[in-house]
Amino acid sequence: MADPILPGATLGVLGSGQLGRMFAIAARRMGYRVHVLSPDDDTPTGQVADVEINAAYDDLDAIRGFVQNVDVVTFEFENVPAAAAELAAEHVPVRPAGRILYITQNRRREKTFLREHGFPTAPFEVVDSLEALRAAVLRLGPPAVAKTAGFGYDGKGQYVLQKPEDAEAAWAALNSTDLVVEGFVDFRCELSVVVARSLDGQTVTYGPMRNDHRNHILDVSVAPADVEKHVAAEAREMATALADTFDLVGVMCVELFLTGDGRLLVNEIAPRPHNSGHLTIDAHVTCQFEQQVRAICGLQLGSARQHTPAAMANLLGDLWQQGPPGWDRVARFAEVKLHLYGKREALPGRKMGHLTALGPSAEAAEALVRQAREQLLNPVSTR
Ligand code: AMP
């Protein structure tokens, strides 16, 4: 097996958002250097990296220069063009491999991969015309959910069709000939498992977490999820089997629906640390970001043991509408941790940070994190 990449080496990250930032913090804590490349500057990752390169992902000259100064490349953003990952791989290890990126950056490829490898999903069809969309909605629903195959996240590029006549409006709104249509799942709850896999195939899992979404964006994650033991075990087994199937080296999140009759369906895969795993920073022996560092460097993984029940609440840009939130109010909660990502502009729906609460039970942690975030909703002047 290849020699491990040891502290002192330089890790390259493609993408510069909060996932890269928390990865870079973990890497620097362990004594690695971090270089980041993205089309922006003064980014969440760039602010904590050693070197920030501002270039487009399809600027292959810039990618070539970037990889010459790093020992391994990873990414925090799955929509990096395949050509960039392929070019990088000619010079240094790219972990996870570009092939995983290629499959997971497109819903059609991802769902087809899942079906071909026997992983349960919501019933779905690939659609390339209005007529096909109408027919698929009749077969799969209604209701049904149409999703653009490429570049969708946080519910963007989705349309819920309540009746077949909604097909015209959905077709116009999504404006794409590459769609996936799914039957609407009347789920009991949404779950996720984060799995890390090392170069030699060792795996550890976190969760399942229970995830609540608001406007299609993750709102609150709770761990451990309040589900039967056998459901939790099955979710972890499924995530591990997927990581093995992909021959993953790195961290991956598997988002699942738990149906009313107790079945688990894979909704989406993210080949990187995930928002629902942010609570691992404060509640687990080794967080998802340190596992990403360990995995891509060819080290053994750390313990994924959860030491305290926890809940995470996202802080979206909407909280800034009446000015900067009163952070001193969350500081009054001794068991709540504040994480802010250093983004300059607070736009509605934009993930600006999160809170993690620890508690004697998952239920108590959830109540606490909601209560702490509630404090930020009131304008500072009413203190
Ligand atoms: P996605 O971008 O596919 O993760 O979808 C975002 C959110 O939309 C999910 O977390 C669900 O809350 C909801 N959603 C997506 N697909 C379906 C479906 N087939 N049935 C019911 N809800 C869905």
Image: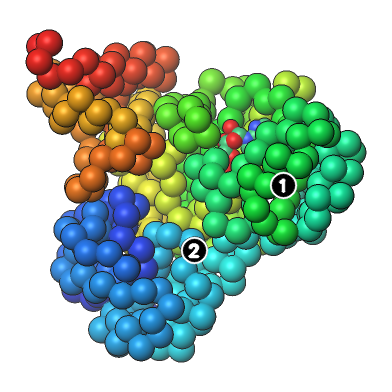
Residue indicated by mark 2: 79
Of residue 221 and residue 193, the one placed in the foreground of this image is: 221
- Does residue 302 appear left or right of residue 114 in this picture? left
**Which amino acid, mark 1?**
Trp
Kind of element beneath mark 2: loop
Along the line of sight, the residue nearer the viewer: 145 or 198: 145
Query: Which residue is drawn at the image coordinates 83% and 38% (left, top)?
Result: 137
At horizontal 40% and vertical 65% (from top left) the residue drawn is 75
Looking at the image, residue 141 lies above or below residue 91:
above
> For this rendering, which residue is in front, 248 or 70?
70
Percent position of residue 12, x then y: 31, 72
Residue 352 placed where, x, y %?
28, 40
Residue at x-position 72% and y-position 59% = 177
Q: Amino acid at mark 2?
A: Asn
Question: Taking 44 as reference, is 56 above or below it?
Answer: below
Disc number placed over residue 103 in the picture, else none? none
The residue to which callout 1 is attached is: 171
Q: Residues within 10 Å of mark 2 (few under 14, many from 20)?
A: some
Q: Quadrant of the C terminus?
A: top left
Q: Is residue 54 left or right of residue 247?
A: left
Q: How many marks?
A: 2
